[in-house]
């Protein structure tokens, strides 16, 4: 497991395969293992880089708020370290928020985008308050209550009922998350900019992927992005919720592979 020191923090990442680079950013409250199936498939033809965002997995936590801008700057520093001037940048959920922040800061470093189960809008005042309360709860009670409350929103009811191995994997990722890392990211998501206006400025090929039954970032959010980003393609994954890349890994991988081969 390679490590990179940024701002006195150790950032963990995997760098697998060779070819044109693809960077994948995980969602909340997960880690880089979220992308295991994608790394296995895409690394056959691409160099796939999957970091643990600050505060998650094997990366250190930062004090205070882990903003999406700060995460984007971490990724730029990682690309500098790996001597990669330009890459496909993809992310799911919170990872998608960081991807949009990255594009705003470093558009010339983006060859193409993959936006999975995410959205450009900022939080409503009610959502901001909810994240602040979740952050306090994580610090006071650990990840258990957050994991329990999130699970039904992450997966389809069928997956919850019939695929215990997927449920176990999702729960293990959430429970391994450091409470202080989760709290910092929750505050960062609450503070993130509304990137709706940025969508009109995206001029690189963009794949938008969403689970048909995503309860957190519904299909309508992806349809709005697709209607605004000029060079975008929208794919709706049937039989998937918010973590479409795990629930329907085969379909997700096919769509991403097809997209990468077309750019």
Image (cartoon, rainbow, N blue to C red):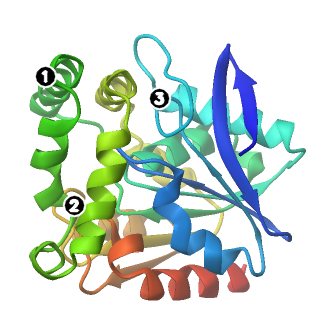
Q: Which residue is mark 2?
A: 154
Indicate whether 186 appears above or below 89.
Answer: above
Residue at image position (29%, 37%) is 122
The C terminus - image quarter: bottom right
Label 1 environment density (alpha carbons within 10 Å; few <14, some 14–19, many ≥20): some
**In what element is the residue under mark 1?**
helix
Q: Label 2: few (<14), some or many (≥20) within 10 Å? A: many
- Looking at the picture, tell me which residue is in the foreground, 156 or 163: 163
Say which residue appears at 10% left-offset and 77% top-offset. Answer: 161
Asked whether the residues under the numbered discs 2 and 3 touch, taking CB atoms below 8 Å apart as contact, a structural biologist would say: no
Q: Position of residue 12 (x, y in %)?
A: 65, 38
Category of crowding for the residue at label 3, using alpha-carbon neighbours closer than 10 angstroms: few (below 14), some (14–19), many (at least 20): many
Left/right of residue 217 with respect to residue 227 in the rendered view = left
Q: Is residue 3 above or below residue 249?
A: above
Q: Give the Cα distance between marks 1 and 3.
A: 18 Å
Instruction: Tell me where residue 146 appears, x and y as whole percent.
Output: 17, 39
Residue drawn at 77 percent across, 73 percent down: 46
Residue where numbered disc 1 is placed: 133
Any mark on residue 55, and which?
A: 3
Classify residue 98 as left or right of residue 74. Answer: left
Q: Secondary structure at mark 2?
A: helix
Residue at figure coordinates x 13%, y 22% from the top left = 133
Sequence order check, earlier mark of 2 and 3: 3
Q: Name the mark on residue 168.
A: none
How far apart are the alpha carbons under marks 1 and 2?
20 Å
Q: Is residue 54 left or right of residue 30?
A: right
Pick the front one: 181 or 21: 181
Residue 151, position in %: x, y? 17, 56
Q: Secondary structure at mark 3?
A: loop
């Amino acid at each position: 497991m390679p490590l990179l020191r940024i701002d006195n923090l150790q950032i963990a990442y995997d760098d697998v395969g060779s070819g044109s680079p693809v960077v994948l950013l995980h969602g909340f409250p997960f880690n880089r293992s979220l992308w295991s199936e994608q790394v296995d498939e895409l690394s056959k033809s691409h160099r796939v880089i999957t970091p643990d965002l600050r505060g998650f997995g094997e990366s250190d936590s930062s004090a205070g708020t882990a903003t999406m801008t700060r995460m984007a700057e971490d990724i730029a520093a990682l690309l500098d370290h790996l001597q990669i001037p330009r890459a496909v940048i993809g992310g799911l959920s919170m990872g998608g928020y960081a991807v949009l922040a990255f594009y705003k800061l470093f558009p010339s470093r983006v060859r193409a985008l993959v936006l999975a189960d995410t959205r450009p809008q900022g939080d409503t005042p009610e959502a901001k308050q909810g994240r602040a309360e979740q952050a306090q709860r994580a610090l006071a009670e650990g990840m258990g209550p957050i994991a329990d409350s999130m699970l039904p929103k992450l997966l389809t009811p069928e997956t919850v009922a019939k695929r215990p191995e997927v449920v176990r994997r999702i729960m293990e990722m959430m429970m391994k998350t450091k409470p202080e890392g989760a709290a910092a990211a929750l505050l960062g998501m609450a503070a993130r900019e509304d990137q709706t206006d940025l969508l009109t400025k995206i001029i690189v090929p963009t794949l938008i992927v969403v689970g048909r039954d995503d309860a957190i970032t519904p299909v309508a959010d992806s349809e709005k992005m697709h209607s605004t980003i000029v060079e975008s393609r929208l794919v709706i994954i049937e039989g998937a919720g918010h973590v479409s890349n795990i629930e329907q890994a085969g379909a997700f991988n096919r769509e991403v592979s097809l997209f990468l081969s077309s750019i």
